[in-house]
Amino acid sequence: MSENKFREFRNLHLRQSPLVLVNIWDAGSAIVVQGNGARALATSSASLAWSNGYSDGCDLPLDILMDSVSRILRVSKVPLSIDIENGYSDSPDEVAKLVKNLVDEGVSGVNLEDGETPPELLVEKILAIKERCGEGAIFINARTDVYLRKLVSAETRLKEGISRLNNYISCGADGVFVPGLTSLGDMSKLSSSISAPLNVMISSDVVNLEEFTDAGVARISLGPVTFIDTYSTLSKISGKSLKAKQPLTLSYDNLNRMCLNNK
């Protein structure tokens, strides 16, 4: 079953137009997105953490992560990918154990990021996952934060991104993810320099798929904007009903700050 779901998920990245993932965070959001025709489901690490009262940034306890995954899988009828940030550990072996647990549960893919750690560490994690899980078990979407965190100068960002992604692909990554990349020109240059499907993140549900197709993009994620927009509506309704002087204005930073303050 896992191998079949892996193949199904992988094949969704090989279509003519990009796979659009409207990111979810719990069983309820999965039911809604799936009901609207999603071919696959994918969590946003930030959204899943916030929905459990934790901040984004590897703060979510693994037992809560696994419980959340189990609840989503109960209602999921399509392949499911889980964003596991950096694997919640700097130990390749521990990250591989986590991914194997996700495979055993029935997860089809994971996002795994380099962040501010040396890219060699992500290479080691990918190799450890391949060794423990084998080929064809789970779709590894290797994420680089070169653009999102501005890890290098703007002039060298594209070159550094291409170098990192090719290293991740050479050691077994099935796809690559570059959040913060917004230039269609850079997307085109990057996609033509790698041999795996390219995933980018957008901040709006209004998108010209033809432009992204022409740029070689295979997968588009909405990220935490789905959670922020949903809970912004809740804030407006609750603020009005409770006659709040100033309803909460929600953003990535505000949600993270509120969750940190409630630890």
Image (cartoon, rainbow, N blue to C red):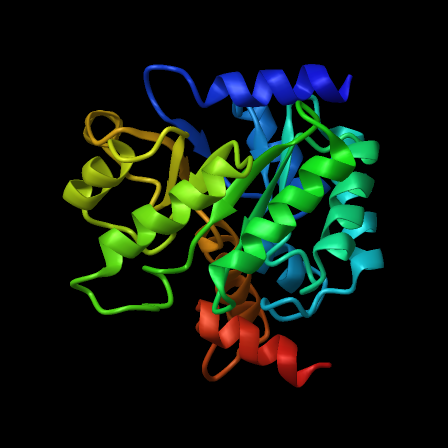
Residue situated in front as seen by the camera: 196 or 220: 196
What residue do we see at 24% from left, 31% from top? 192
- The vertical placement of 237 against 257, above or below, is above
Find residue 17 and report its horizontal and vertical position in percent.
Answer: 33, 20
184 displayed left or right of 15: left
What residue do we see at 64% from left, 52% from top? 84
- The vertical placement of 17 against 30, above or below, is above
Quadrant including the C terminus: bottom right
Q: Quadrant of residue 231?
A: bottom right
Find residue 58 and report its horizontal and vertical position in percent.
Answer: 65, 66
Please say whether residue 44 is visible from this viewpoint. no
85 displayed left or right of 72: left
Quadrant including the N terminus: top right
Number of marks in the rendered image: 0
- The vertical placement of 220 against 85, above or below, is above
What residue do we see at 52% from left, 80% from top? 244
Please say whether residue 212 is visible from this viewpoint. yes
